[in-house]
Image (cartoon, rainbow, N blue to C red):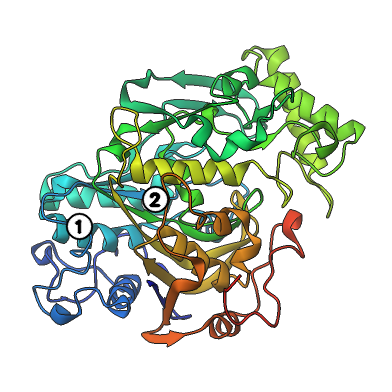
Amino acid sequence: MGQVSIIRNDSVDYPKAGQLSPDELFPEYAYSSHGFSGRNHVYPLIRQCLKGYGCDIDNYDSSRWNPLGKWIEKGNRVFVLTNFVVHRRPWESRERFLAKCTHASVIRAVLDYAIIAAGDAHLVSFGNAPLQGCNYAEVTEEAGATELTTFFREASHTDIGPHDLRLWKSRWTNFGALLDIQKEPLDHAVQFDLGSESWLDDLFEPHKRTLVRVGDYPPDDTMQYHGKGKHIYVVSKRILNADVIISIPKLKTHQKVGITCALKGTVGAIARKECLAHHRLGSPEKGGDEYPHAEFLRDMSSAMSERVCTLGMDLPSNLYRVTSKVLARAMRLGKKGITFGAWHGNDTAWRMVLDIARILRFGRLDGQMGDMPIRRHLALVDGIIAGEGEGPITPIPRRCGTVIFGDDICDVDTVCALVMGYDPRKIKMVSHAFHSQSYPITGRSMKDVEIRLNDKPVNVADILRSFAPAFAPPKGWTGIMEAGSGLTHLSR
């Protein structure tokens, strides 16, 4: 039986800069000599969430309390996988930015408890691989994560992070012109070929032309990683060196897969994102799932977006690139503005996500999959300010005052879907994560999760009622994944 703990307090907000430490001396706190911060209600909220799960409950409120010790043994290496998507844009409010990126106050508490369990701060680190064009210095500064760098250097003399896991980075203007590309060698990554074991392989039928794509990368580069019986993913060694992964995703919607929490957050482990399959080129009539129906302008926009990925950075190329971006934005306008796989008919992206989640559980440093799980994967979700609507890049902020913890990312995503007012059985990424297959992400079934809200056991109907109204879904998912009024349990 799986278990997920939810703690909700609508009055909680993120602390201000310089206030990431707890504002009171908890018995287990290890850094009292470095002072305390001002008002910080997030730290005790996470503490309460771990207690609500029952973590080391016999030692709670004592100096011996080690809430993550059940999963992290002394000497284990831990990587905390955050959700830094992209830096704050000039037109974007701070609250809108906080609706899409993990806040440092949540990361800080998780790091503290991971260090207690591992026994040494040098064994713990954090970071992720954001979008290709993300300014990592800016996104981590805005999220407060660079403050963590300073604190842990002073308190434990370690470079805990944040670590940028990308091996392909680019710089763009706000208008969509490309300024620079940096590609690093694969020395810091491991390639895994899941072959016919990949969830994607069923899409590659004999005598059928299947073209998988990921935005802003040359199509030929992506196709080098995928074909019938060949599905290669490039994963950061820093993640694979860990014995335990703790994901701290943002609670928010996602245009391509419905929601993005712990499962979708595993994409942050990919060092070279040209290997990802976000959608298949074209409409279903042409064997794709990029958008519901073929239309002249939509097809033209797709073709232009493909071509610009092969162009240089000279003036004519960037003029063409900016024109392509403008047309793509125009195609996204309106209720039927579906482009680049941003809809429920996308049958590609969820398969990619589940492949990566399996690799993080079973993947060895030699690029082979183990017979048994290699590492454990926990999740604590940042829902203090959540995101609804057109996530993951432009979500609308939803103040939720919520954190969610579990030791199984499939259980956690099931509960996240319910908190958002969705039926997890209607979200392929979540429902298929429980299917028995080689290298299973979980050994549980969806209906086996026990949910605790504010330290009390609750059922599905309680969750839906407590967090109503439901999150606004992305427009490509409207009427698809919302939970029905009669949903009371998760049996199939």
- Can residue 61 be seen at all in this image of the molecule? no
The crowd level at tag 2 (other Cα within 10 Å; few <14, some 14-19, many 20+) is many
Number of numbered discs visible in the structure rendering:
2
Residue at x-position 46% and y-position 41%: 356
Residue 71 position (above or below residue 403): above
Instruction: Give percent across and percent down for residue 332.
Output: 78, 45
Q: Which residue is mark 2?
A: 82
Residue at x-position 30% and y-position 70%: 43
At label 1, which amino acid type do we have?
Ile
Residue 382 position (above or below residue 156): below
Q: Which residue is mark 1?
A: 72
Residue at x-position 51% and y-position 26%: 170
- Label whose residue precedes the other's in the sequence (1 or 2): 1
Instruction: Give percent across and percent down for residue 4.
Output: 40, 72
Cα separation, mark 1 vs mark 2, equals 18 Å
Residue 468 position (above or below residue 441): below
